[in-house]
């Protein structure tokens, strides 16, 4: 692994977990390139050397000794569900330790683009619901065409991606208490329509501040 790269980093009141730099999307507002794989001074460039669940847990425990995190967030510069096995293994271990009182009762959140069911060809939301307390799905548009233009999915996800992400949100909302659908606050977005769509899927709405990487 790139020794400089952070697999766990602190931001606000949470520890963020950087499992992978791989992502099925290439969003027009992605900060990976404009910020040269850095975020808040942290180097998130794994250079293809992705951490194991034990690597991640070790770093979380080390950070928790000096940082009272209220949340653990699987996020990073990449789509966390591309490492589904590692995500589930690490989250399960944290949940076990929380239930035994060996760790404080922080929440475990997943930030995702919502394409995992399409990527894996099966419904993964049941497995997530066992270990994840909160899911934020970056949908970014209430309109399919605009979604394609903004998130620029890989060719194999262009046709079915949007509907699959909507289904994913709905399935998560049936099983997980806190599910949010977010949209980046950028010119040309229809926040009201997005709020309505989120509600119709059983989720909350979240307007994410636009960070200009220039
Ligand atoms: S989903 Fe995130 S990591 Fe992937 S391209 Fe979009 S902004 Fe970048």
Image: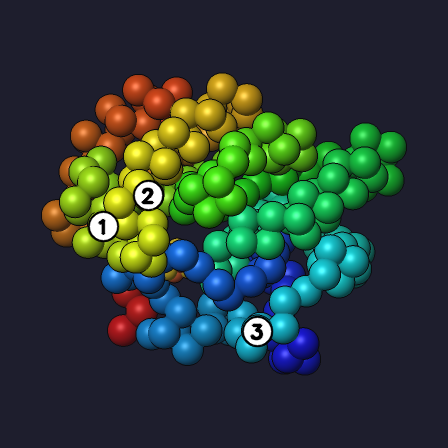
Q: Position of residue 108 (x, y in %)?
A: 63, 40
Say if mark 3 contacts mark 1, CB within 8 Å: no
SS for dot 1:
helix
Quadrant, the N terminus: bottom right
Which numbered disc covers residue 48?
A: 3
Label 2: how many residues lie within 10 Å, few (<14), some (14-19) or many (20+)? Answer: many
In this view, the residue in front, 54 or 104, is 54
**Residue ID for mark 1:** 148
Is 89 rendered above or below residue 33?
above
For residue 119, side relative to residue 185 (left or right): right
The answer, for residue 75, to whether it is visible in the render is yes
Q: Residue furthest left?
A: 188
The answer, for residue 12, to whether it is visible in the render is no
Front disc: 1 or 2: 2
Label 3: how many residues lie within 10 Å, few (<14), some (14-19) or many (20+)? Answer: few
Q: Is mark 1 within 8 Å of ligand 1?
A: no
Q: How many labels, in total?
A: 3
SS for dot 2:
helix
Say if mark 2 contacts mark 3, CB within 8 Å: no
In this view, the residue in front, 55 or 204, is 55
Q: Residue at x 63, y 67 (%)?
A: 50
SS for dot 3:
loop
Q: Residue at x 78, y 43 (%)?
A: 93
CA gap between label 2 and label 3 equals 25 Å
**Which quadrant of the frame does ligand 1 lie within?**
bottom left
**Residue ID for mark 2:** 161
Say if mark 1 contacts mark 2, CB within 8 Å: yes
Is 187 rendered above or below residue 7?
above
Q: Residue at x 33, y 43 (%)?
A: 161
For residue 101, side relative to residue 71 (left or right): right
CA gap between label 3 and label 1 equals 26 Å
């Amino acid at each position: 692994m790139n020794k400089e790269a952070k697999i766990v980093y602190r931001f606000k009141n949470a520890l963020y977990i950087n499992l992978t730099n791989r992502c099925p999307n290439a969003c027009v507002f992605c900060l990976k390139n404009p910020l040269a794989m850095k975020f808040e001074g942290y180097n998130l460039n794994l250079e293809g050397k992705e951490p194991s669940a034990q690597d991640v847990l070790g770093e979380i425990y080390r950070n928790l000794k000096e940082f009272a995190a209220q949340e653990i967030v699987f996020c990073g510069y990449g789509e966390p569900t591309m490492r589904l096995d590692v995500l589930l293994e690490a989250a399960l271990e944290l949940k076990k330790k929380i239930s035994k009182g060996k760790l404080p009762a922080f929440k475990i959140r997943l930030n995702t683009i919502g394409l995992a069911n399409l990527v894996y060809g099966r419904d993964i939301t049941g497995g997530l619901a066992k270990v994840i307390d909160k899911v934020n799905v970056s949908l970014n548009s209430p309109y399919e065409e605009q979604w394609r233009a903004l998130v620029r999915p890989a060719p194999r996800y262009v046709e079915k991606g949007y509907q699959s992400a909507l289904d994913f949100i709905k399935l998560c909302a049936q099983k997980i208490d806190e599910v949010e659908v977010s949209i980046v606050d950028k010119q040309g977005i229809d926040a009201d329509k997005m709020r309505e769509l989120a509600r119709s899927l059983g989720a909350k709405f979240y307007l994410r501040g636009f960070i200009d990487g220039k």
